[in-house]
Amino acid sequence: MSDDSFLFYQSRSPRPFLDHGEGIYLFDESGKRYIDGSSGAMVSNIGHSNPRVLAKMKAQMDKATFGYRLHFRTRPSEELAAKTVAMTPEGLDRVFFVSGGSEAVESATKLARQYALTQGQESRYKVISRFPSYHGCTLGALALTGYAPLRDPFAPMMQAMPSIAAPATYLDRDNLSEDERGLKYAELLRDRIIEEGPDTVLAFLMEPVGGASTGALVAPDSYYGRVREICDEFGVLLIYDEVMTGAGRTGKFLAAEHWGITPDIVALSKGFGAGYAPLGAIIAGAHLVDPVLDAGGFLHGFTYAGNPMACSAGLAVLEEIEDQGLIDNAARMGEVLMAQLHILMDRYPFIGDVRGKGLLTAFEFVADRDTMAPLPPEMDAYARLVELAYERGLIIYSRRTRGGTAGDHFLLAPPLIITEAQIIEMIAILRDALDAFAEETGLPVEAQA
């Protein structure tokens, strides 16, 4: 926030005025170019200023920009719902539109609760989530978020919900295989359901690949199927928060597809509208939705749900994802990016882990790779590297790794249109920023790498 601005957001960090975007690049009013290495907040999946998307939005703008869903059906919302169902696993065939990720998570949990009521399961209300995790900033979504700095100030205003540890197996120091570790973390869910009382547990909410709070955390393959089995055993609904992972980012339309999992409810946003309009959705099966509608309707909604402008943008985005083969490109370029991150890890001993799937990747700083102890919090590494990269024309995204109070991870999640040459360009800037950070802090660099 500057002295001549009436706006306020999270902080006072100064930033230049945005002029325009083009592909993976953004330009400020001075003409400086930035590589959008994080797709904003993991949003701009198809890049900036796509002319075909803009043309389809303009065509809808010329017809109608708003039609309230209780007064009219709209072609864009119907067509986007059909397109979404066609791109998701079988059994997910009902769509409810929202304007963002927090709304999607709240909608998913409220649908779950209303479904339980139709089944005579009034005692089910607890939603188990993981720690760390991030599911949104509204009070309902925040109650399910495991990130202390964002959650703790508002704790007295929220319904406390149970959680289990996120499967951060890269921190484990044991003799188990990765599959055994995955099963160990999955069993935490079963134990917690029993502890809480199975007749009180409504749903389990998880990010299939971690987002802001865990930095592209991927569980061992064994974890996903076992979690599905445990939910089925106790009649607990499985909700996947695919706000960040959905719409092709991980190399599948839904990250759930990597493990052959069909969740009961999926929350989508971010790349679903790709920054062209505020847009999100929940997707569920008719077997969940129809009983709710038959019982009097879904007791929930938002003014802009199904807005024809937003839905025309979303439909155009999904068409671009298909027409340009961006899901496959995310898988291929994700392998290129991961290989480059491993090269950086060889050069910088303070990079303790690199991880991710597709074009949702991250690297984490540590003080010691053997113990995985984090850097001292007062070093403020997660903020400083972001600034050094920004000064050099690269935008990356960071958070505290260990529940929000310690640790430093950095997300690299460029638009799905990125090329191998652009990845090399991005990594060169990042390497320069890492060199500057190492020089400032006295951290070691392996010169031979």
Image (spheres, rainbow, N blue to C red):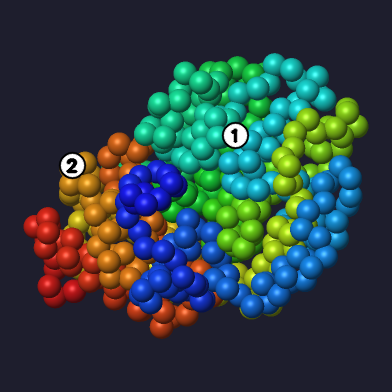
- Residue 200 is situated, as x and y percent measured from the top left of the image, at 64, 19
Tell me what residue is drawn at x 55 percent, y 35 percent.
138
Position of 102 compared to 121: left or right? left
The foreground one among 65 and 326 is 65
Q: Report if residue 246 is visible in the image.
A: yes
Q: Are marks 2 and 1 in contact (CB under 8 Å)?
A: no
Position of 213 compared to 162: left or right? left
- Residue 75 is situated, as x and y percent measured from the top left of the image, at 86, 60
Q: Report if residue 315 is visible in the image.
A: no
Tag nearer the camera, 2 or 1: 2
The foreground one among 391 and 103 is 391
Tell me what residue is drawn at x 78 percent, y 23 percent.
117
Which residue carries the number 2 mark?
A: 378
Which residue carries the number 1 mark?
A: 204
Position of 370 compared to 254: left or right? left
As drawn, 214 above or below 53: above
How dense is the environment of label 1, judged by Cα within 10 Å: few (below 14), some, or many (20 and up)? many
Tell me what residue is drawn at x 66 percent, y 27 percent.
202
